[in-house]
Amino acid sequence: MSARAPDQALTGKTSVDARAFCGFQDRFFRDRPMDPVRIAVVGAGVVGLSTAMCVSKLVPGCSITVISDKFTPDTTSDVAAGMLIPHVYAAYYFFLISKPAAQSAVLEDSGSGSNLLCSGRDARLTGSTDPQDSARDTPIPKQKQWFRETFDHLFAIASSAEAEDAGVHLVSGWQIFRSVPTEEVPFWADVVLGFRKMTEAELKKFPQHVFGHAFTTLKCESPTYLPWLEKRLKGSGVLILTRRIGDLWELHPSFDIVVNCSGLGSRQLAGDSKIFPVRGQVLRVQAPWVKHFIREGSGLTYIYPGISNVILGGTRQKGDWNLSPDAEISRDIFSRCCALEPSLHGACDIREKVGLRPFRPGLRLQTELLAQDGRRLPVVHHYGHGSGGISVHWGTALEAASLVGECVRALRTPSSKSKL
């Protein structure tokens, strides 16, 4: 693959109006009417690989390349505990308006509820001209949809002959609370299996806690799941390229569409100052007698048994970029987990792991058309999952693939027939 460096730095980046995009469509359709649309997926964590997989399955007539400077076992996803218990997303970044406001606005697609940038006559619909402010609360039904789609996808794997190779399995346990939560039944209760209130007999195991949930969910072992995804991608013809990208324009003109799944890398690649790290430190220990997960209601302390080890956590250190393990934090994690499961005092082969969760005020899942010096580059952004990436990765990847499909159809349709 060859790539041309940008003529200048990505300054003055703007989204273009409908007339300009239609001209872009005309040239694309005229010059390459039968060629496959070339798609670059930037990022090789669970979000990037699952997005590439969904695009390969759902968007025909494409060639796909996954590009990243880090692959498993060196991604943030490799450190993730991998338990399917949803993180609640307070805000959902569903469209982007770039300054000046008169140059762009939103055209909603009635089929998927997603958005493409279009002409400026309806800019007032956004309520803001600042791309960092284009957010709304994520409806609980949407979050539940993402979680259910991910749960169903992984449950099918766990029920298949691929379960061991993919590192996906069922695990039962308890979520415990020191006081009765305001919401005694969470929105995802009917997605997991066998959800119920803990009995008094069960709560005797946790004398400092007064309420709890018992249920069966799925655990996705990322150090096994990611290589399995890579193997399936290669088998379907997707190319894997190790390369560090400093600017999305580096991928133009070698690619027609870019899917940005770069997580924290979006601070540089997308100019997103709202994304920040939340440092997570965990311990991986050998304690094969631990069979049930235990999670305190806050989600800060947890014991998650896996196939080859037990994960003990954790921390949430906002804005901390340090990837080196902290011995004092490790002692604190171990102490907290032993308070919940005293038998862990007998654990051995304790290993420390650190990852940086990509947090932002809302998950960013949207389409943007970049323009610079007469060039056009459609970008689908898909990042900012925070601590909930594993729990919703397949659901949000399906939605990202839908956005990519819209871009492909727009590129393949002459302007006279295009809804844009």
Image (cartoon, helix red, strand yellow):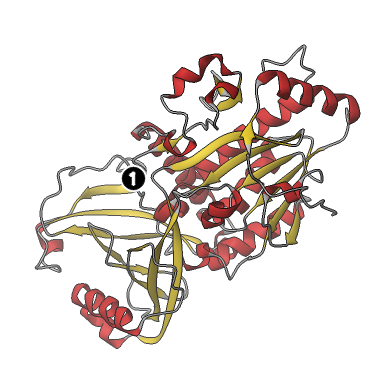
Image coordinates of residue 87 in percent, x first then y, are 35, 49
Left or right relative to 307: residue 342 = left
Image coordinates of residue 158 in percent, x first then y, are 51, 55
Query: What residue is drawn where x is 57% and y is 54%?
Result: 268
Left or right relative to 61: residue 172 = left
Query: What residue is drawn where x is 38% and y is 79%?
Result: 288
Count neighbours of disc 1 (C-alpha within 10 A) and say few if under 14, some if 14 to 19, many if 20 or more: some
Q: Quadrant of residue 188?
A: top left
Up-down relation of residue 407 to residue 154 (above or below) = above
Element at badge 1? loop
Up-down relation of residue 313 to residue 218 (above or below) = below
Up-down relation of residue 136 to residue 123 (above or below) = below
Image coordinates of residue 269 in percent, x first then y, are 60, 51
Image coordinates of residue 225 in percent, x first then y, are 57, 61
Query: Where's the C terminus, which quadrant?
Result: top right
Query: Where's the N terminus, which quadrant?
Result: bottom right
Q: Which amino acid does the dot numbered 1 rest on?
A: Val
Query: What residue is drawn where x is 15% and y is 69%?
Result: 205
Q: Which residue is mark 1?
A: 88
In the displayed orientation, state which residue is furthest to the top.
416
Query: What residue is drawn where x is 44% and y is 75%?
Result: 353
* 349 or 261, nearer to the observer: 261
* 385 or 211, nearer to the observer: 385
Left or right relative to 77: residue 311 = left
Q: Quadrant of residue 259?
A: top right
The count of marks equals: 1
